Amino acid sequence: MSHAYLNALGVTCTLGSGKAAVAEALFAGDDRCLQPESGWIPGHAPSLGAVRTPLPAMPESLAASRDNRCNRLLLAAAMEIEGDIRTAIAHYGSERIGIVLGTSTGGIEEATDGLAAWRRDGTWPSEYRYAHQELAGPAECLAEWLGLAGPCYVISTACTSGARALISAQRLLQAGVCDAVLCGGVDTLARLPINGFHALEALDPARCNPFSRHRHGINIGEAAALFLMTRERGPVQLLGSGASSDAHHMSAPDPDGRGAMQAMRAALADAGLQPAQIDYLNLHGTATEHNDCMESRAVAEVFADGVPCASTKSLTGHTLAAAGALEAAFCWLSLTDDRIARRLPPQAWDGAAIRNCLRCASSASASIYRPAARAV
């Protein structure tokens, strides 16, 4: 059992900016945030989970990053917990605090604009910065703003990136390399992935419908979720984690769910828990034909006696590399809910469950959390 605690959370997504706004929309099941957006795919207006709240201005010291939306989205989440971060820096020292993030789009949208201008005009725009599209860019931006000197890197393993960042942060603490780690995920809307999923015929033009037999694909969203993880007791404990890679196919999971089962069982073993001790699962639930069928089978196999579960992607869209961290944030909000009966994130769908699948990406990760007040 690990001693890793998620002491603070900053979050922004299409549901809102900040824990209070996100929790209010999340637990209300507000499905109005996925809206048709033109200008991303010629001749189409797919439903997207855009962050529509104003983003903070970049500090003067980060003026070179002011045109990078990924960095601004990350900074919005970081500023929510800046006080906690500054306290940790004063307590541990800047060299003992690491940064591990998951991302995939980074500054690819800005790079797309820059390349278009170069092809049109023969010169790069004055605001173009190659560094914006480097994979480590968001982590380095955060380190520069905070003056941190600990380990600083980005993980990019598609949909599992944000969750893998939390696993890596946990390992840095366990190894004694860091005393605190800023970890999570960030991704923004960009034409490259949106058009890529459109070419795969994987986008639902309307709101996605996870685990329904009427599902037609995913919606893309954007988000940033950032945790301050330490070994000191905090509101939520990360009990265990597991990861797998079944290498079944570049863009499709093993239909029998072997990778997902392996990840969930590894997380249970790491936490020293049995399936019956789990109170809720936040499912990947992309609303694609293959994922939902595979995931249903995997959950039914591992949790044979049943477990409350939901996919929140019909509220936020699939936030790509930020998805695992964002959904961990939803679990954090549920576990820290101050109501007597804690609320669970709901699922917005038509209720037409998949037939012949409930019981009948090539990588997966799973983590288990609980309120630290119950931790032993």
Image: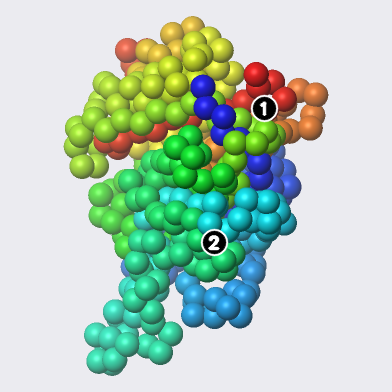
Viewer can see residue 361? yes
Which residue is at 80% across, 24% downward? 340
Viewer can see residue 74? no
Residue 75 x, y percent position in the rendering: 58, 63
Dot 1 crowding, Cα within 10 Å, few <14, some 14–19, many 20+? some
Which label's residue is closer to the chain start, 2 or 1?
A: 2
Against 83, residue 376 (above or below) is above
**Quarter of the figure with residue 118:** bottom left
Residue 195 x, y percent position in the rendering: 31, 60
Residue 342 x, y percent position in the rendering: 72, 26
* Nearer to me, 84 or 208: 84
Q: Amino acid at mark 2?
A: Leu
Instruction: Say the numbered circle drawn on residue 371.
Output: 1
Residue 362 x, y percent position in the rendering: 27, 35
Q: Amino acid at mark 1?
A: Pro
Q: Secondary structure at mark 2?
A: loop
**Disc 2 to disc 1, how far (Cα)?**
29 Å
* The residue positioned farthest toward the top in the image shown: 305
Q: Secondary structure at mark 1?
A: strand
Which residue carries the number 2 mark?
A: 148
Which residue is at 69% across, 47% downward? 19
Left or right, 10 with respect to 349, comes to: right
**Quarter of the figure with residue 122:** bottom left
Dot 2 crowding, Cα within 10 Å, few <14, some 14–19, many 20+? some
* Nearer to me, 203 or 295: 295
Against 369, residue 135 (above or below) is below
